[in-house]
Image (spheres, helix red, strand yellow):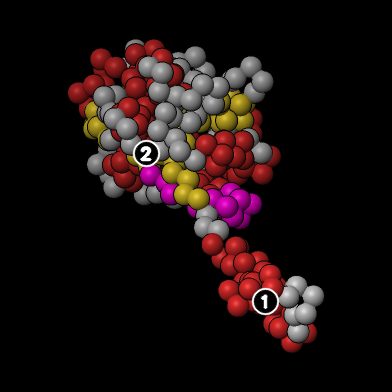
Amino acid sequence: MTRIATLLMRNPMKLDKPLVGSVALMFAGLISVVWVASPAQAQPEPLTIAAANSLRDVFRKVLPLFEAQHPEFVVRVVYGPSPTLRKQIVEGSPVDVFLPSLVEELDQLETSGLLIQGTKRVYAGTSLVLITSTNLPAPIGSLEDLQTVPIRRIAIGDPKTSSVGKLTLQFLNYSKLENKLKSQYVLGEHSRAILDLVANGEAEVGVVYQADAVTSKKVKILDTAPIGSHAPVQYGVALPWTAKNISGADSFATFLQTPQVQTLLQEYGFDRITVDGGADRRGGGQP
């Protein structure tokens, strides 16, 4: 290039044609290399999601759909009890999207100024249900039977560590069953642990989210807790203060509300959220 530039400066009108051709080819080659190399350098941007355990099954379908429609992002997901995930976010865990099983977990972060303003929304709901093992079913058929039929063990979530445990305790107090059954409690860290306790015969019955029970062949649903017996189970999504991939997080939160994802959620025991924020149980999985 130095020799070519010098010749151009000294004899701009006398540069021989072979040399001009070489220059043209050289620049064409450079342009070609740049054009081909650019796409190869574009790497998908990581999107880190912290999600409640009860989303694990449906997310096996949802996440591949999102990545197929958004190849610019690659999803990394961490599952766990919602209170545990919230505490990790408070401590600075690098999370772009937080999806707890109770919107109250988001409210706590918002009150502390640990959510990006305006990103909180509710996208689904579910119900609280009574389950028993399919192999060794309990001799009861409804929640009312718990008042009269003796049982040895009932598996519930630990109210100190799980959202489902908090709601179960609300229901048991509402139904005046807490004092009667508390000596029979077997505590699980989350809904999946409760499912295992019931399926393995360590508890005759258990209380879990419908979204956890409908996909299990080892348990069956006996009854659903009535509306008003506990706080609504509303699944929310928001961007915490630790979010770095703002664009990806917002795209995912919006994706959850698309008809395609809402249909999948219903197939897995979740309820649509109505305009007033309540859950429409008509479309959810049935006991």
* Outermost residue, left side: 183
Q: Could you say which quadrant of the image residue 9 lies in? A: bottom right
Q: What stretch is highlighted in magenta?
A: 65-78
In x, y percent, where is residue 46?
Answer: 47, 49
Q: In this view, does 240 lie to the left or right of 92?
A: right
Identify residue type, mark 1.
Answer: Leu
**Mark earlier in primary sequence (1, 2):** 1
Instruction: Decide whether residue 70 is among the magenta residues.
Output: yes
**Residue drawn at (22%, 27%) of the image:** 184
Residue toward you, 142 or 50: 50
- Residue 264 lies, with reference to residue 16, above or below; the image says above
What residue is disc 2 on? 94
What residue is disc 1 on? 7
Q: Is mark 1 on a helix, strand or loop?
A: helix
Say few, some or many: other residues with alpha carbon within 10 Å of mark 1 (under 14 / 14 to 19 / 20 or more).
some
Residue toward you, 33 or 14: 14
Q: Could you say which quadrant of the image residue 98 lies in? A: top left
Query: Is any atom of residue 130 visible in this view?
Result: no
Q: Which mark is residue 59?
A: none
* Outermost residue, front side: 10
